[in-house]
Image: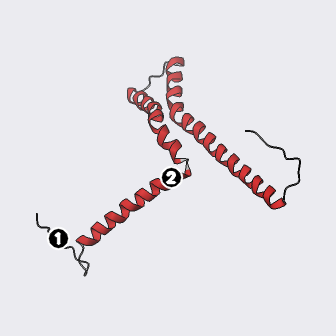
Amino acid sequence: MQTLVLLVDIHPSVRQRCLEEQKRRRQRATKKISTFIGTFVLCFAPYVITRLVELSSAVPISPHWGVVSKCLAYSKAASDPFVYSLLRNQYRKTCTDIINRVLKRSSLNSSRIRGENGRSTIIQTAA
């Protein structure tokens, strides 16, 4: 990241806004890096520990646990695009809008099935 040094005096309010923007960018970068490292450790730690225990000791490892730990490691690659895209505010906002629209439509459909007195009625449409 490059920093521009100005040799002229800037207004304190402009300087304050620039400092706040820098702080927000640092926080976003910290959040993304923490997510990258956290998901990597969470998904690969069980697999690596299982393989190290298998190699270093005579303790038998359950085949089911071996498959689960391997699937967890593979699932990281499949879930990465979704996890990292949810870190973007625009994508997150669009997803919540879509979910809200779907939920509102489903609540409208369920309200059509119910009558005004609250009893369930069946609405038939002519085919």
Could you say which is closer to the camera, residue 121 or residue 112?
Answer: 112
In contact (CB < 8 Å): disc 1 and disc 2: no
Q: Is residue 98 left or right of residue 111?
A: right
Identified at 41% across, 56% down, the residue is 98
| Quadrant of res 39 | top right
Q: Is residue 27 left or right of residue 62?
A: right
Could you say which is closer to the camera, residue 41 or residue 6?
Answer: 6
Report the quarter where the N terminus lies: top right
Assess disc 1: are there few (<14), some (14-19) or many (≥20) residues with their C-alpha within 10 Å of its C-alpha. few
Q: Residue furthest front?
A: 8
Q: Is residue 125 shown above or below 2?
A: below
Q: Earlier in the sequence, mark 1 or mark 2?
A: 2
| Element type where label 2 sits in the image | helix
Could you say which is closer to the camera, residue 20 or residue 73?
Answer: 20
Q: Position of residue 44 (x, y in %)?
A: 52, 31
Identified at 56% across, 34% down, the residue is 41
Q: In the image, which disc is placed on residue 123?
A: 1
Question: For the residue marked with disc 2, what is the amino acid?
Answer: Arg
Q: Rounded to the nearest whole Å, what is the CA distance between mark 1 and mark 2? A: 37 Å
Report the quarter where the C terminus lies: bottom left
Q: Is residue 92 shown above or below 55?
A: below
Identified at 47% across, 54% down, the residue is 94
Q: Which residue is mark 2?
A: 92
Question: For the residue marked with disc 1, what is the amino acid?
Answer: Ile
Assess disc 2: are there few (<14), some (14-19) or many (≥20) residues with their C-alpha within 10 Å of its C-alpha. few
Q: Is residue 30 left or right of residue 19?
A: left
Q: In the image, which disc is placed on residue 88?
A: none
Q: Is residue 77 shown above or below 92?
A: above
Identified at 70% across, 46% down, the residue is 26
Q: Is residue 12 shown above or below 58?
A: below
Q: Position of residue 46 (x, y in %)?
A: 51, 31
Q: Is residue 34 left or right of residue 124?
A: right
